[in-house]
Amino acid sequence: QLAAMTTLYMAIKLFEPLEMETTFLSQLSRGCYSSAEIAQMEIDILTALNWRVHGPSTISFIQYFLMLLPVAQNSPVVATLLDCARFQAELSVGDYYFATQPMSYVAIGSILNAMEGIGIHNLSNSERTVFLQQAFKATGIDIYSAELTEVRSRLFEIFAKSSGLETNEKCDDASMGSTIQKERAVNCGSPVCVSRRKGLVRA
């Protein structure tokens, strides 16, 4: 329980604009753990992880990879690819298989799958080729490797199962965007944000 509370505390420090005091966590534990015990557990966890607690997420990789597209970053096609790829990345969290794969593979696989649903009139073959060349140059990832092919296949499966559509059924259709939003509303509900609780102070 102490480890769980401490990792929550660490995650808030890393990814939220607010800072939670250890005294507040101690209060949440109803006095089971003191501020000093929480602080010591944080040090123990950081030491065990060699302070490697802020690596890029799959979503971060997706955003970085999309910057390699030879199109304007504020264009609708980039926004559509981002939304479709991000949706696949979110779904991948529920499948342990993806925890064993590099996040960069899940990211590039999500983007390539999303491209299957983008019409040539929105993203030309030459633009796709440039993207693939730039991605390989930047990462060395072989898009034809067996590992990435398997990642893409698993992403296809969970996407189709969740949305009822195949990714090649036009990610740029309004129906796809509507489906993604509905699935997020159903599957990604969250309790009240921790940052809204009393006792938090701005960092």
Image (cartoon, rainbow, N blue to C red):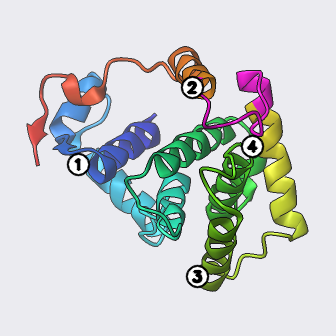
In the current view of this chain or complex, which residue is farthest to the right? 146
Q: What span is colored magenta in the figure?
A: 160-174
Q: Amino acid at mark 2?
A: Ala
* CA–CA distance in space, label 4 to label 1: 34 Å
Q: Is residue 35 above or below residue 169?
A: below
Q: Earlier in the sequence, mark 2 or mark 4?
A: 4
Label 1: few (<14), some (14–19) or many (≥20) C-alpha neighbours in 10 Å? few
* Percent of width and height locating residue 169: 76, 33
Disc 3 target residue: 138
Q: Which residue is mark 4?
A: 96
Would you say the magenta stretch is mainly helix, strand or loop? loop
Q: Which mark sits nearer the N-terminus, 4 or 3?
A: 4
For mark 3, give the secondary structure: helix
98 with respect to 123 (left or right)? right
The answer to whether 186 is drawn above or below residue 148 in the figure is: above
Frontmost of labels 3 and 1 is 3
Residue at mark 2 to residue at mark 1: CA–CA distance: 53 Å
Residue 187 relative to residue 149: left or right: left
